[in-house]
Amino acid sequence: MTKNNPLQVRTFDHVTLIVADVEATRNFYVNLLGMEEKPRPAFDFAGAWFEIDTVQIHATIASDLAGLAGWGDRKVKAISRGHHIAFEVDDVDAAHQRVLELGIKVGDGPKTRADGAFQLYIYDPDGHLVELFSSPS
């Protein structure tokens, strides 16, 4: 691979998450995070698509072909350095209070990131790690 002739990707489109329960996943990404559910092609397997701005999450039901739900135990000692997806929110403290009210599992935080942003790590229903952050004022 050479840096003199990059592919020039145009945009980030989606990430696929393998899930055990599409309804629980929908509840988390739509009802908690506020993503919009989008129409999905008529695949021969269950799933759902969610979108924020121009980026989508493609939730695919666990199966022999797709694999197990979640990311599993990856022996991560500092979760902020492991696999995760991140969303910006207006107020991490308010998000933290809402997460606690709903009984969502918190992984770490809220805390200040090295660049001054505030961050909170939570888990979706399948154990995918989700970072919520807000920029410093």
Image (cartoon, rainbow, N blue to C red):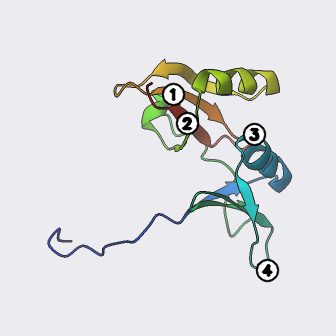
Q: What element carries label 4?
A: loop
Q: Is mark 2 on a helix, strand or loop?
A: strand
Q: Is residue 114 left or right of residue 84?
A: left
Amino acid type shown at disc 4: Ala
Pointer 4 local density, CA inside 10 Å: few below 14, some 14–19, many at least 20:
few
Q: Which of marks 3 and 1 is nearer the N terminus?
A: 3
Q: In this view, does 39 lie to the left or right of 110?
A: right
Q: Residue at x 49, y 31 (%)?
A: 79
Q: How far apart are marks 3 and 1 (CA)?
A: 17 Å
Q: Is mark 3 on a helix, strand or loop?
A: helix
Label 3 close to label 1 by CB (< 8 Å): no
Q: Mark 1 points at which residue?
A: 119
Give the foreground label among 3 and 4: 3
Q: In this view, does 76 lie to the left or right of 104?
A: left
**In this rendering, does residue 61 appear at all?**
no
Q: Name the residue under label 4.
A: 42
Q: How far apart are marks 2 and 3 (CA)?
A: 13 Å
Q: Which of marks 3 and 4 is nearer the N terminus?
A: 3
Q: Specify the farthest residue to the left.
A: 4
Q: Which of marks 2 and 4 is nearer the N terminus?
A: 4
Q: Is residue 93 left or right of residue 113?
A: right
